[in-house]
Image (cartoon, rainbow, N blue to C red):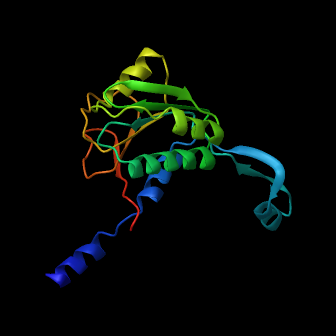
Amino acid sequence: ADLQRFVDEMLEPKVDWREELRAEITARAKGEHVSWKRPNRRGKILFDAYLPSYFDMRTGCIVIEIDTSGSISSDELRRFLSETASILADCPPDELWLLSVDASIHTAVKVEDLNELEEFARTGLKGGGGTDMTAGFRWVEAHGVEPDFMLVMTDGYTPFGDDPGYPVIWAMSTDVEAPYGKTIHIEGEAS
């Protein structure tokens, strides 16, 4: 049995959820920008000419819905906020909306930098009731927001509703699988 478990683990290597989430988000980044500030060294080597560098992967409009229901632990909230900070740092969105949601929307704010994210973490994370992540989809529709994708950070104990018609990434802190979109299982820190 131990040998079979070893073989199973070798045949199904575990992918770090942070890398998987980052890959999903950067895959949706909109283009590259050209800069002459730092010339591309490959151009000098290959063509004996200075060429521009490409940088600044931006992700358009993102809506991040954070589950603040009573079943979400403070550790899960820390992971959700940490990944949001990582998105802001790695590939800044043109527009980022953060929603604090349990069975309804408690806070909906547009965030542009890490200071505003910190303020949201201090004052915007409200909830503690039941769970209905479809409230975020209704908010997007009611406010005319057109996300390039939506990231829903939850434990998955929620109604899923119908596919909203735009890409949805579900960052699940449990082994629940969403019926549509991309599901990424996020894990707690090893103790």
Q: Residue furthest left?
A: 1
Residue 142: quarter of image: top left
Residue 27 in sight in this render:
no
- Left or right for 93, reference 139: right
Q: Quadrant of residue 151?
A: top left
User: How far from the left and from the top, in percent, is residue 125?
Assistant: 46, 35
Nearer the observer, 11 or 101: 101
Residue 59 rendering spot, x and y as whole percentages = 57, 39
Q: Quadrant of the N terminus?
A: bottom left
Reply above or below: 186 against 189. above
Camera sees residue 11: yes
Q: Nearer the viewer, residue 81 or 146?
A: 81
Residue 116 % position (x, y)? 62, 35
Q: Nearer the viewer, residue 61 or 71?
A: 71
Above or below residue 127? Residue 173 is below
Residue at point 83%, 63% (across, down): 44
